[in-house]
Image (cartoon, rainbow, N blue to C red):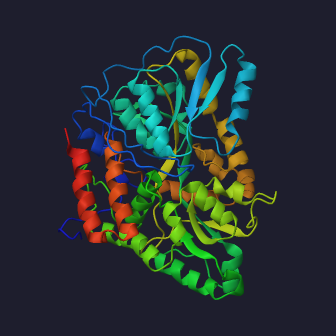
Amino acid sequence: MSRRGRHGEFGHGEFGHEGYGHGQSGLPVAQRTRARVRTRPAVRTWAVAASAALLATALAGCGGTDSSEPAAGGPGEFTGRGPITLATGKDTTRTLQGQLDRWNKEHPDEKVTMIELPESADQQRQQFIQNAQTKSDAYTVLNLDPIWVAEFAANQWVDELPAKEFPLDRMLPAVVRTGEYFGKQYGIPFNTNAGLLFYRKDLLDKAGVEPPITWAGMKAACTAVAELPEGKGVGCYAGQFDKYEGLTVNFSEAVASAGGTVVGADGKATVDTEEARKGLEFLAQGFKDGTFPKESSTYQEEDGRRAFQSGKLLFHRQWPYQWTLANATDGSSKVAGKFGVAPLPGLDGPGKSSLGGLDLAISKFGKNKATALDFIKFFSNEANARANLKATSAAPPYTALYDDPALREQFPYLATLKESLSGAAPRPAVVRYGDATAAIQESAAAALSGSKSVDAALVEMQRNLSAAIDEK
């Protein structure tokens, strides 16, 4: 029961079991309740540290069209062949160029040039939006955080794609839906993502404790390990707590893991609730009592990865890509072969991950769209997803790969990842996502720093998030 008498029902609406809460239109509820999008000046952009965020907002406002609903009719014609570009976040895995080289060797007259955007997803989104608002043809194929698809489709910055020409029936349904808007496909999954709990198996075994399934169990495990000679100087837990999209992800996971929602089935903000209070209290108390190292308040993905690999963390909330890097035997990781992976812990049992990943889209203003369409078919196919998994441990969108015996032997966490994906909860899918995530980040950061109480932060967040959702 909420503090104001509302039920914080988990498993519905924006934070449903398999992803978006769809009605017959196939559109997330919060999007169906939106009638109009209008041009709006840029809103405040906060500085962010470098990181490989798979998600984000630069908090620049959305330029708009007259209606959030796309025009009637199917996908337009994809004409023109020749060179194209792929705009994507910084390739921290250093594997994308190899994939492009394979395409370029077979298509010498239709070469793809990669445009690497910053590591910070907030800054990525800002550059994507600036490119679209100026109607520039500099970007052809966009590698988008799935949560941006609704915004880009509503503003007619990306083209509707011919869904029947892609093997979407072989992909995880929740992942496919991240590329939908009003029941039409605007993004094709390149990969997907769910948060996992990386833990030092060697230290837990030494302390005689099992991987925790609750927040309380995690703290108890940290206490037990701290008493070991090997546990001296090892921090308990870190996630992505800098004030950027990663904080929206971690806050959303904490709320969902306490049984709450951020946006309810009716498309309304639901953060001024008892469940949300418990989730934010877990995060704020973690810094207050030292469960979370002080320096982790500025962690983005890569900061935490480096800390975990150097042996400074017992537990780390991270995306699957950390598996391969942390197991490197070239001397870059001190924990290779010493860690395991488990589902995220929650208040009373296993927690809920946010749904992440990357979706490929075609810029409305790009040239050579016939080439772009064929390239997306190549870049998103199952063979490439398998290669990505082997090279980077990136989560594939194809269902069958999670049950492949050879892959499970190489990546024993795949069963855990599949379980996390099946229950992953997407962030609020609203057209004005930049304003929505800004409201979440501002208030959550204030609670984590102690400049606002948890209750005051949630009251403020409810007000500002509601304004971002409801403003016409």
User: Residue reaching furthest bottom?
Assistant: 227
- Quadrant position of the N terminus in the picture: bottom left
Q: Quadrant of residue 470?
A: top left
Q: Residue drawn at (74%, 28%), measured in percent from left and top?
A: 102
Does residue 258 appear in this view?
no
- In percent of width and height, residue 394 lies at 63, 48
Q: Quadrant of residue 180?
A: top left
**In front: 234, or 357?**
234
Q: Residue furthest top?
A: 80
242 over 76 or under it: above or below? below
Seen in the picture, residue 215 relative to 392 is either above or below; the reply is below
Expressed as whole percent of the image width and height from the top left, the position of residue 442 reads: 34, 57
Q: Residue at x 37, y 56 (%)?
A: 441
At horizontal 53% and vertical 17% (from top left) the residue drawn is 369
Near-viewer residue (1 or 273):
273
Asked if residue 57 lies left or right of residue 71, the reply is right
**Residue 353 vertical placement versus 27 (above, below):** below
